[in-house]
Amino acid sequence: MKTIPNHVSAYSTSPVFTQDTIPERLRHDHHTKDETWAKIHVKEGVLLYYIDDAETPERLTADRPGVIEPNVRHRVEPEGEVKFFIEFYH
């Protein structure tokens, strides 16, 4: 599993999203800016995390966060009921 580098620090956090409030832009391929990392924190349930057109997603849970690397295309999909937020680093 990827990790956030030690040389970056958190600067922003998204609101908590649910399966009903995930912004459409997160459900479609998108990427972070240069030098911007992020971590997906699942509070409840399972979130499917697709990276670079991968057919098989990572299953994110409270015990398994997802790391978003700069400029890497990705998207998410809920697997049933879910609550999560995203923490941004640079």
Image (cartoon, rainbow, N blue to C red):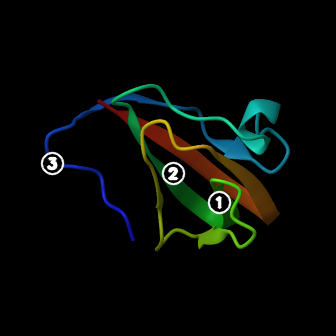
Viewer-side label of 2, 3: 3
Viewer-side label of 1, 2: 1
- The answer to whether the residues at label 1 and label 2 have Cβ atoms under 8 Å apart is yes
Q: CA distance from mark 2 to mark 3?
A: 17 Å
Q: Amino acid at mark 1?
A: Tyr
Q: Earlier in the sequence, mark 2 or mark 3?
A: 3
Q: Relative to residue 24, is residue 47 drawn left or right? A: left
Q: Residue at 69%, 64% (x, y): give it.
A: 54
Q: Relative to residue 17, is residue 71 drawn left or right? A: left
Placement of the C terminus among the 4 image quadrants: top left
Q: Residues within 10 Å of mark 2 (few under 14, many from 20)?
A: many
Q: Residue at 61%, 70% (x, y): give it.
A: 58
Looking at the picture, tell me which residue is in the foreground, 75 or 78: 75
Q: Relative to residue 45, is residue 34 drawn left or right? A: left
Looking at the picture, tell me which residue is in the foreground, 29 or 42: 29
- The answer to whether the residues at label 3 and label 1 have Cβ atoms under 8 Å apart is no
Question: How far from the left and from the top, in percent, is residue 57?
Answer: 68, 69
**Residue 49 badge:** 1
